[in-house]
């Protein structure tokens, strides 16, 4: 990286936008490899960690990516820091709060892969263009479960109001590292809120299951929605369309089976799930998804991590395009 400072803090037109990744664990390392292998608009400017012996930092050095093991303070002190436009944070919710505060004076675009949710939620196929227009300095990628299921809730809500939406994200226990486990509470809270705010549900609920099965299972997600009378063909078509759109940047994202519609018996107490003032519901919609990882760095069963890094990459590429 050049030692010449760029006082504008922006990449010159025609050049790739330089990015930094904070967090040299599984998610950060996979994201770095995606930037290097897949992106035509982004260029790695730095890999940041706190463990000098981490595999992520070692790989970054082998790939000729500038590194620091001194965290965000080390990033800010790097010679090429001024040339970096976008910073991915793949640490933890608590760490992101501190990292964002330290980076705030420097005018970087932050893409947060933790459940901290300091900034607005972004699910690329649902509201990325809206957030591009808003030009927030810090955007949140929700959670792996949110990236997988919120597009489905949104697709249903485009046809008919969704009074209640519940998602269950089942992932291999092997793919849940210390950061994921430390953030379980934030996962459920952040995902539930995003189901409502981005997906459009009147009330949202999120559940995560860490499955210890061997061999490790591929990520599975179930979306359960309560709706009134609506055209089932339109709902099915809306879901299939958005599944295809997600699959454009997450190739392993797919429907596991046909969308199911079940009438709600008159005596079933679903009113306990509905927000106050919700319209009457008559139908349960169930959608079953599978997310297989691309195995750039993580194993294929870790689709939960792959969908996060893929969504973050898609968001950052669009941010880079509009900032030129």
Image (cartoon, helix red, strand yellow):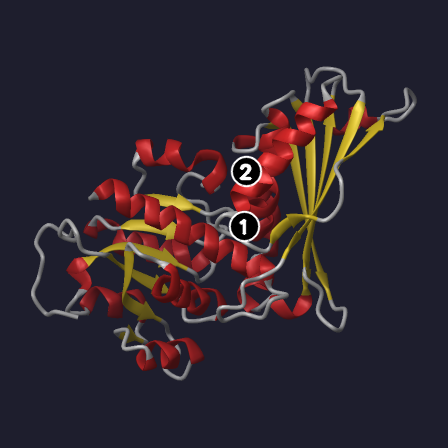
Q: Are marks 2 and 1 in contact (CB under 8 Å)?
A: yes
The image shows residue 41, relative to residue 37, as above or below, that is above
Quadrant, the N terminus: bottom left
Q: CA distance from mark 2 to mark 1?
A: 9 Å
Task: Name the residue located 19 percent from the left edge and 63 percent from the top edge.
Answer: 81
In the image, residue 249 lies at what x, y percent? 48, 50
- At 20% from the left edge and 44% from the top edge, which residue is drawn? 324
From the viewer's side, name the closer residue of 109 and 235: 235
Is residue 175 visible in this depiction of the protein? yes
Residue plotted at (50% across, 54% down): 308
Q: Residues within 10 Å of mark 2 (few under 14, many from 20)?
A: many
Compare residues 147 and 33 and report the one nearer the observer. Answer: 33
Residue 136: x %, y % from top left: 32, 38
Residue 159 as seen in the image, left or right of residue 135? right
Residue to which mark 2 is pinned: 194
- The first of marks 2 and 1 along the sequence is 1
Q: Is residue 274 visible?
A: no
Picture quarter containing residue 161? top right
Identify the residue at the far bottom of this view: 53
Residue at 16%, 59% (x, y): give it: 82
Q: Residues within 10 Å of mark 1 (few under 14, many from 20)?
A: many
Q: Which residue, given by chain and number where applicable, does mark 1 sit on?
A: 143
User: In the displayed structure, would residue 202 be above or below residue 169?
Assistant: above
SS under mark 1? loop
Q: Position of residue 43 (x, y in %)?
A: 27, 62
Looking at the image, residue 26 sits to the left or right of residue 6; the answer is right
């Amino acid at each position: 990286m050049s030692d010449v400072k760029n006082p504008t803090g922006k990449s010159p037109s025609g050049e790739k936008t330089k990015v930094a990744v904070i967090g040299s664990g599984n998610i950060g390392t996979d994201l770095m490899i995606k930037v290097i292998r897949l992106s035509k608009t982004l260029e790695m400017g730095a890999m940041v960690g706190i463990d000098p012996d981490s595999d992520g930092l070692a790989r970054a050095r082998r790939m000729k990516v500038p590194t620091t093991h001194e965290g965000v303070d080390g990033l800010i002190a790097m010679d090429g820091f001024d040339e970096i436009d976008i910073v991915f944070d793949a640490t933890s919710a608590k760490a992101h709060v501190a990292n964002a505060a330290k980076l705030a004076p420097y005018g970087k675009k932050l893409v947060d892969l933790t459940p901290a949710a300091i900034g607005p939620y972004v699910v690329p196929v649902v509201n990325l263009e809206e957030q591009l227009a808003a030009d927030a300095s810090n955007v949140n990628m929700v959670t792996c479960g949110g990236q997988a299921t919120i597009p489905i809730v949104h697709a249903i809500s485009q046809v008919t109001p969704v009074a209640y939406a519940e998602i269950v994200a089942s992932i291999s226990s092997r793919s849940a590292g210390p950061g994921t486990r430390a953030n379980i509470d934030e996962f459920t809270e952040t995902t539930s809120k995003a189901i409502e705010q981005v997906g459009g549900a009147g009330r949202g609920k999120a559940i995560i299951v860490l499955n210890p099965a061997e061999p490790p299972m591929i990520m599975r997600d179930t979306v359960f929605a309560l709706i009134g009378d609506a055209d089932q063909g339109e709902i099915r078509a809306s879901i299939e369309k958005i599944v295809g759109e997600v699959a454009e940047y997450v190739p392993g994202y797919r429907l596991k089976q046909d969308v199911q519609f079940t009438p709600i018996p008159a005596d079933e107490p679903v009113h306990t799930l509905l927000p106050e003032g919700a319209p009457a519901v008559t139908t349960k919609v169930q959608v079953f998804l599978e997310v297989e990882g691309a195995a750039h760095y993580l194993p294929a069963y870790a689709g939960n991590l792959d969908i996060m890094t893929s969504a973050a990459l898609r968001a950052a590429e669009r941010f880079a395009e509009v900032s030129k």
